[in-house]
Structure formats: C-alpha cells, structure tokens
Image (cartoon, rainbow, N blue to C red):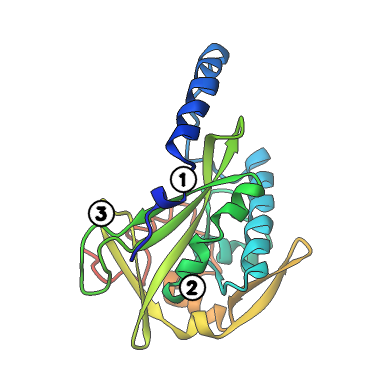
Amino acid sequence: PTRRSSDLRWPSSVRSATRNLIGPWLLVCKVKRPSFFKILTGKYVTIAERMLRDVVDVLDSQEIPYVLEGGTLLGIVREKRLLPWDTDMDITVTREHAEKLISSRWRLWLKGYRTRIRYHKQDTEHFKKGSPRLLIVQTRKFFVVKDFGLMDIFIKDTIDEKVFWMVSEKKRVLKSTRKEYYQNTTKVEFQGKHYSVPAAYDEYLTSRYGDWRTPVKDYDYTKDDLSILNKK
C-alpha cells in the first residue's frame, strides 16, 4: 500500500507536546513566516549548495539512483554554478526507487532538513492516485519549524520507453522525455563533489530547452519546457 507522509510523523502526543512547548515561545519572539521562494543568491545559494551535497550524500549512501534535473543541471554544466535567478534545485528519482527514497527521510532530518511529500490526487493514464510525485526538501529552524524549500525531488513514472511526471498540481502540467536519460548516466564535478547527470546531457537539455547554451532568465517551467505534452 502507498505510504502517506503521516505514516512517518512523530506520535501525536509528541507533536502536541512540541507545539505546546515551542509555539508560545515563537509568538513571543515574533518569528515571521518565511517566504518559500528564495532566489539562489547570497546566503541562500550557500545554503542550497550545502543542501545539494547533503541530499546527494544520503542518496549515494542508500544506493538510490538519481540525476540532477532542470535548471540545476543546466546551471552546473553550463555555468558551473546554481542559476542565481532560479528559486530551487531539482533532482529526479524514478518510481522503482521511490519507497527507498521515502524511507530515507529520517536521514535528511538528521542532517537538519524537513521533507514533505506531494501526492497525485487522481488516477490518470500515467499516474496512480495517492502515489508520491514529489519530495520537497526544506531547511528548518528551532528544530521543528519549517524555514523554506530549496529542493524538489521528482518521482517519475516509466512507461515503455518514456518517463512521465507532473508539475504544478493546480495547473497539472504533464511532461515526458526518454527513459534512457535516467538509465545512462555519468558524473560531473561541482565544487569538489561529483554528481550524477544524464550521459547525453547535451541532447537531454536540448530536448527540454532548445538552445540551452543561451541564458533565459524569464523561463517559465509551466509553459516553455519543450517536454510538455498538454501545452495549450
């Protein structure tokens, strides 16, 4: 059966005690609700770079195959940096490794991060209702309080020779590309660490962005991605 995020929460008695203990103190300190969309500049790019290393350390230690995705891959192979106009990082894990990924969430907690799962809300030709589609990795403060999300780990479904995924549950943007990009990988170096990327990353990026060597700062991932299947 599909496991929900609630399966991995602390017991209700612990959560209640934590809220009672920390909640009033946060009100006194007037902690502001964070913005969840931070461009990757200044202190945020430093935090993002550390998160990328930490998350990949967990994936590697648990032998969970992954590839860098989207703007994260684009920035690292083209500019040797995270794109400063991007708002988060993207990684892909395919469906057959989803359970192992989700069961490793506590390892990310030990490294100082919160995680949240987003699920498919209905059965479709490509996805099963209730199956995880995205794992969001967030920084946290005061031990339990969420700060802001800086990484999306997409969980993509393989059907025949294609891989499918959905972005923006509200807009329901369906995307697809060839599964070989996730099966045949190589390593690229970034800040002293090697990351897994599609072996044919030039071809892959072209299939997603067209002329990917030319920066486009106002790119809209819900409209401009060449892998969108249900583009209006």
Q: Residue at 58% of width from left, 52% of height from top? A: 106
Q: Residue at 32% of width from left, 54% of height from top? A: 168
The spot of residue 50 in percent (x, y) is 69, 51
> Dot 3 corresponds to which residue?
171
> Dot 2 corresponds to which residue?
97
Q: Amino acid at mark 3?
A: Lys
> Dot 1 corresponds to which residue?
9
Mark 3 or mark 2: name the one nearer the start of the chain. 2
The spot of residue 58 in percent (x, y) is 64, 62
231 displayed left or right of 134: left
Q: Give the secondary structure at mark 2.
A: helix
Q: Give the secondary structure at mark 3.
A: loop
Toward the top, the furthest residue is 28
| Label 3 Cα neighbours within 10 Å, binned few <14 / some 14-19 / many ≥20 | few
Q: Residue at 40% of width from left, 70% of height from top? A: 156
Q: Amino acid at mark 2?
A: His
Q: In the rendered view of the protein, which quadrant contains the C terminus?
A: bottom left
Q: Amino acid at mark 1?
A: Arg
The spot of residue 144 in percent (x, y) is 55, 35
Q: Quadrant of residue 80?
A: bottom right
The spot of residue 135 in percent (x, y) is 46, 56
CA distance for labels 1 and 3: 29 Å
Of circles 1 and 2, the one toward us is 1
Q: Are marks 1 and 3 in contact (CB under 8 Å)?
A: no
Count of marks placed on residues: 3
Mark 1 or mark 2: name the one nearer the start of the chain. 1
Question: Looking at the picture, does residue 178 appear above or below residue 39?
Answer: below
Q: Is residue 109 visible?
A: yes
Q: Give the secondary structure at mark 1.
A: loop
